[in-house]
Amino acid sequence: MKESKGAKILRWNIGLLVNMIILLCLYQCFQVSYDFAYQIFGANSKSQDASLSTTIVVEKNDSLLEVANKLELLRMIDNKYAFYIRGKFSGYDNKIKPGKYTVNQAMNNEEILSKLAKEEKENEDE
């Protein structure tokens, strides 16, 4: 049985629509992947305002992910998972020292990790 001209056009249009939806989904996946990779490897900070600072207390047995969670709750970083992965890749996962640290939103992930890994602690009798 021969397919009518109208059925061919309809089938072609449906195929085009399906392909466009697939391309849109791929574009969105690449965009999300790029944004996440930029959060990990880019030198981005939450804000340029260094006056937006707070104190974070790192306990002795806190893991890197727990520290990242605290920083995200304090709104010092955008994404705790990007911070965690950056810390793992940079080798800070076992170098975080317990203590009290002042961080601000103008600091990027690498600067915060570097500060938490050094022994630049503030007085704990505040």
Image (tube, rainbow, N blue to C red):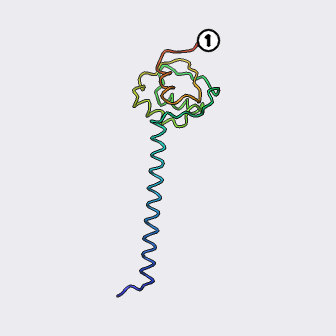
- The structure residue drawn at horizontal position 50% and vertical position 21%, both measured from the top left corner, is 115
Q: Secondary structure at mark 1?
A: loop
**Looking at this rendering, what residue extends furthest in the left direction?**
1
Q: Quadrant of the C terminus?
A: top right
Quarter occupied by residue 4: bottom left
Is 28 above or below relative to 69? Answer: below
Q: Quadrant of the N terminus?
A: bottom left
Quarter occupied by residue 91: top left
Q: How many marks?
A: 1
- Residue 38 percent coordinates (x, y): 47, 40
Q: Nearer the viewer, residue 59 or 93?
A: 93
**Looking at this rendering, what residue extends furthest in the bottom direction?**
1
Is 6 above or below relative to 113? Answer: below
Q: Nearer the viewer, residue 68 or 78?
A: 78
- Residue 39 percent coordinates (x, y): 49, 38
- Label 1 environment density (alpha carbons within 10 Å; few <14, some 14–19, many ≥20): few
Is 86 above or below relative to 7? Answer: above
- The structure residue drawn at horizontal position 42% and vertical position 84%, both measured from the top left corner, is 5
- Residue 66 percent coordinates (x, y): 50, 29
Residue designated by label 1? 125
Q: What amino acid is at disc 1?
A: Asp
- Residue 117 percent coordinates (x, y): 46, 20
